[in-house]
Amino acid sequence: MTTALGDTLEAQVTAWFTDDPDPATQLALTNLRDRARDGDPAALAELTDAFSGPLSFGTAGLRGALGPGPNRMNRVVVARAAAGLAAHLLDHGHAGDRVIVGYDARYNSDVFATDTAEILAGAGLRPLLCTQHQPTPVVAFGIRHYRCAAGVVVTASHNPPHDNGYKVYLGDGSQIVPPADAEIAAQIARASRVPVAGLRRSDDYHRLGDELVEAYLSRASALVAGSSARELVWVHTALHGVGTEVVTRAAVAAGFPAPHLVEAQAAPDPTFPTVAFPNPEEPGAIDLALAKAVEVGADVAVANDPDADRCALAAPVNGSWRMLSGDELGWLLAAASLADGVRGTYACSVVSSTLLADLAAAHGQPFAQTLTGFKWIARVPGLAFGYEEALGYCTDPAAVADKDGVTALLRVLALAAGLKAEGRNVTDLLDDLARSFGVCLTEPLNYRVADLALIGDAMARLRATPPGTLAGEPVSAVDLARGSDELPPTDGLLFTGERVRAVVRPSGTEPKLKCYLQVRLPPDASHDLALARAEASGVLARLRADLAGALGL
């Protein structure tokens, strides 16, 4: 009998319910189905979207809202992903090889990780399953440390509480890139033809305890052993994520004092109750850390995102506390690395500031620009340091071929303590860089949408009628989708003028259209930093307004 769902959706729901091993999502599916049958339009819309197609597996792995259906994160989707990954590894000759599996503290992360380990073991691989939640960079470290063929981290990083994700690395320690993503996706599609109950499982896998963390901490603390200054008052927030324990242990192991913790955000909590979004970049996310910094008279405050692969720095600037931009912290860490004589290629993504190229050149080191994401940055040959404006920093690429918020934090502490010993602070170093390379201001302009079609429409409008001027300056437009000798094709647009620069692209992990703005003045126009920054700020405001008008959002 036909219902409000229609015959096709009714059949899909029934088949999914039968295949689902999780009573919680079975109950949620039953509730949605019954409400939809009774004419609830919200329930019907949710159910239709949940069964609109499989959750896309790409270079970022999987990421989506928790719930029943193939377009959600749940035990069925994760089991199929694990089976697809296993088949891919077996096809590439990795039978019997190790695969490390870690997870954060979000809802069901531990369950998804255990399912993954059981299915990998059932396929003839040797999973190493973390026995408790860990920061993503700790698990990424374990790939090379244990000579694994691959790694999986169940995490949605800084996404909202109702999301979860599935991040995949290969044996070089980096996140997957084409063609591996498409090959794994094809294997997942094949695995989806088999009932989940038919996937072979085994509990014959190794459980990794504190030995993984100890090995990581030994490596991390050695990174700052060359600096002697350790006097520092600092605040840390984990934003309800998994970073507090490892960060505190890392700092103490490296000889720094323990942090003043933002207690309300120190323990893992998948509801993220004190923030609207658990991302240090979001307005208000680090307000509690700034208040704590003022309370204790801190020199710096440092925030990690929930899986601790990102790092944000706040410091007193002209008498008031503010969080530095991701570019500013990237400049500081790169400048410190170059000053320490670290040789190799310095890299950042196309959406990050252009200043790093000049910094590297001034020290006789090569520079590389990549597509967005550490799956590209970490693969730069001879990488010494890489960063992305979204608070991601790769400071020890030989050990962790990904962004690492813990080792970045240790580098921050060493830099801040060294400057304090000289009677200086991070603001003074930023001023030095501005005088040498010119004032550079960067700013994100983001649009979070409920309807993803709005993003596609905005990109189409911008491609069809790109602005010829921004902030009163003529600009040239480059469609990054066409690719170049330096960059493979990607969905984005780059606008460049004499002093202004803007990149526009859809987010790969969130329902956002992201714009990356830069205004840069030459050194000879930056002698008076206050005047130069005021001028650049005015240009940035016009750039923001002009680009917003061109987007029509």
Image: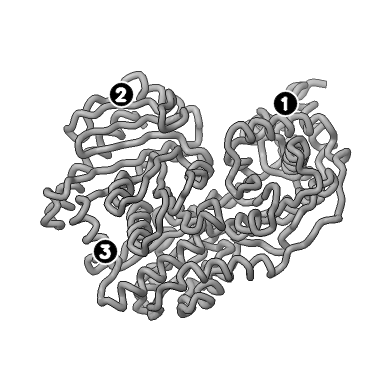
**Which residue is denoted by mark 2 in the rendering?**
466
Q: Residue at x 30, y 23 (%)?
A: 466
Q: Is residue 216 left or right of residue 202?
A: left
- On the image, the x and y values in percent for residue 39 come to 68, 30
Q: Badges 1 and 3: C-beta atoms under 8 Å apart?
A: no
Mark 2 or 1, nearer chain start: 1
Residue 108 in view in this figure? no
Residue 222 in view in this figure? yes
For the residue marked with disc 2, what is the amino acid? Pro
Q: Residue at x 43, y 36 (%)?
A: 513
Question: Which quadrant: the N terminus?
Answer: top right
Q: Residue at x 35, y 59 (%)?
A: 338
Of residues 41 and 448, the one nearer the viewer is 448
For the residue marked with disc 3, what is the amino acid? Leu
Mark 3 or 2, nearer chain start: 3
**Which residue is denoted by mark 1 in the rendering?**
5
- On the image, the x and y values in percent for residue 375 come to 53, 43
- On the image, the x and y values in percent for residue 78 come to 73, 43
